[in-house]
Image (cartoon, grey):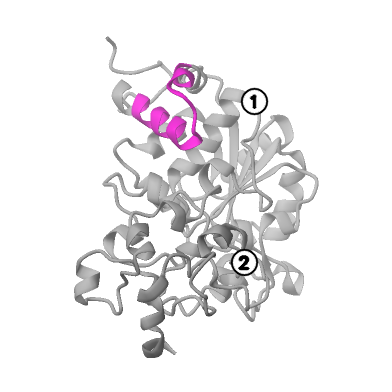
């Protein structure tokens, strides 16, 4: 059997790595094994969609995390199933040649637009300029001609740290400015590369974008609270908590809610997909979730090491109502905050109250 899957693919991407990447994406999408051959066919067809990848206000962390993924090499897989016509970080061209590549694709070919980074709007957008144009101008020029837009990372989706109060540059996400194009938001700081790969493969296989929630996040990646499928959930339900980093409970892997974990208010697939090809994610290595897939998390989730506000729970009926309350990120009253976070805590959390107020 040939080592490579298809002649258009990079010869360093062997068949096993290719199939493993597609299988990971299929699993993330919640598709049955029967769909894997169809996804493989779509990915290896050679009909690679052209992609324009714009960088605005950001740290390039989303690209860097994708480039450093391994087991399989998701970056190599993604870069082989798409035609990346413009990407400031990885393209060989520079200066006028790079800009020529951008405009040649935009004006002459159908393409997907990927945006990484927030768009500053104050002072006529002068806080981010490329080739003499502001980010606002570039987005206004490119977005209308795109078939669809993928905003990758919390900066591009919701403004990120640039949009944190007092937001001096007026940073916003793509969907705050573009209203007439289908947009997929893939938030995270950074997001898992599998979520991006899954979105691309879904588009290639079914010729449509995946189902999304009201924040335009793909449901396959952001359809569940982290808290609901966290490996430490059993400790939460039994009231076993880390009181401070490094204590005995921390060493035993107890729940991190009391030291600031924002899992009860955060929607993401981190516990299921994990990072770095070595089956880890922040909570598994002892650090609480900071809520980075949610809008305005730099304002709503800080201080990161303080637990979410709570209300006094009588002790019964909590589990029944948990999934319908707890809307801190969505701006409901503070009185409702923490009802979800208080689910199942019972006696353990009530006893710990006096030392944390």
Which residue is pictured at 41% across the width and 71% down the height?
346
Task: Return the x and y of residue 266 as percentages of the image width and height.
Answer: 52, 60
Closer-to-camera residue (233/279): 233
Which residue is pictured at 76% across the width and 52% down the height?
178
Cβ atoms at labels 2 and 1 below 8 Å apart: no
Q: Which mark is residue 178?
A: none
Which residue is pictured at 43% across the width and 22% down the height?
33
Q: Which residue is mark 2?
A: 327
Which of the marked residues, 2 or 1, is nearer the chain's N terminus? 1
Q: Is residue 176 shown above or below 47?
A: below
Task: Return the x and y of residue 76 as percentages of the image width and height.
Answer: 39, 35
Density class for disc 1 (Cα within 10 Å; few <14, some 14-19, many ≥20) is few
Q: Is residue 284 visible?
A: yes
Density class for disc 2 (Cα within 10 Å; few <14, some 14-19, many ≥20) is some
C-alpha distance separating marks 2 and 1: 34 Å
- Give the residues drawn in magenta, as a range: 18-37
Closer-to-camera residue (256/313): 313
Which residue is pictured at 37% across the width and 17% down the height?
5
- Quadrant position of residue 211: top right
Q: Which residue is mark 1?
A: 207
């Amino acid at each position: 059997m040939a080592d490579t899957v298809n002649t258009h693919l990079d010869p360093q991407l062997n068949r096993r790595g290719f199939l493993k990447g597609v299988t990971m994406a299929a699993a993330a999408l919640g598709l049955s094994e029967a769909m894997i051959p169809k996804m493989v066919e779509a990915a290896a067809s050679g009909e690679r969609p052209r992609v324009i990848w714009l960088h605005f206000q950001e740290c390039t962390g989303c690209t860097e995390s994708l480039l450093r993924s391994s087991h399989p090499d998701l970056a190599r897989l993604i870069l082989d199933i798409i035609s990346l016509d413009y990407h400031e970080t990885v393209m060989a061209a520079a200066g006028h040649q790079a800009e020529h590549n951008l405009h040649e694709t935009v004006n002459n070919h159908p393409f997907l637009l990927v945006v990484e980074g927030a768009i500053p709007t104050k002072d006529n957008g002068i806080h981010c300029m490329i080739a003499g144009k502001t980010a606002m101008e570039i987005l206004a020029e490119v977005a209308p001609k795109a078939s669809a837009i993928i905003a990758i990372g919390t900066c591009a989706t919701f403004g990120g740290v640039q949009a944190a109060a007092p937001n001096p540059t007026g940073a916003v996400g793509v969907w705050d400015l573009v209203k007439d194009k289908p947009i997929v938001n893939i938030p995270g700081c950074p997001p898992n590369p599998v979520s991006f790969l899954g979105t691309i493969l879904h588009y290639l296989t079914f010729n449509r974008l995946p189902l999304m929630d009201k924040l335009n996040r793909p449901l396959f990646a952001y359809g569940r609270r982290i808290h609901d499928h966290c490996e430490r959930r059993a400790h939460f339900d039994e009231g076993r908590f880390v009181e401070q980093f490094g204590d005995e409970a921390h060493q035993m892997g107890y729940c991190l809610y009391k030291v600031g974990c924002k899992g009860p208010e955060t929607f993401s697939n981190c516990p299921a997909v994990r990072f770095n090809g070595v089956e880890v994610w922040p909570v598994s290595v002892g650090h609480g979730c900071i809520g980075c897939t949610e809008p305005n998390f730099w304002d709503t989730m800080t201080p990161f090491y303080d637990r979410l506000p709570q209300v006094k729970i009588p002790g019964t009926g909590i589990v029944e109502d948990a999934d319908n309350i707890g809307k801190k990120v969505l701006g409901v009253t503070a009185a409702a905050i923490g009802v979800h976070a208080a689910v199942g805590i019972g006696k353990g959390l009530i006893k710990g109250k006096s030392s944390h107020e």
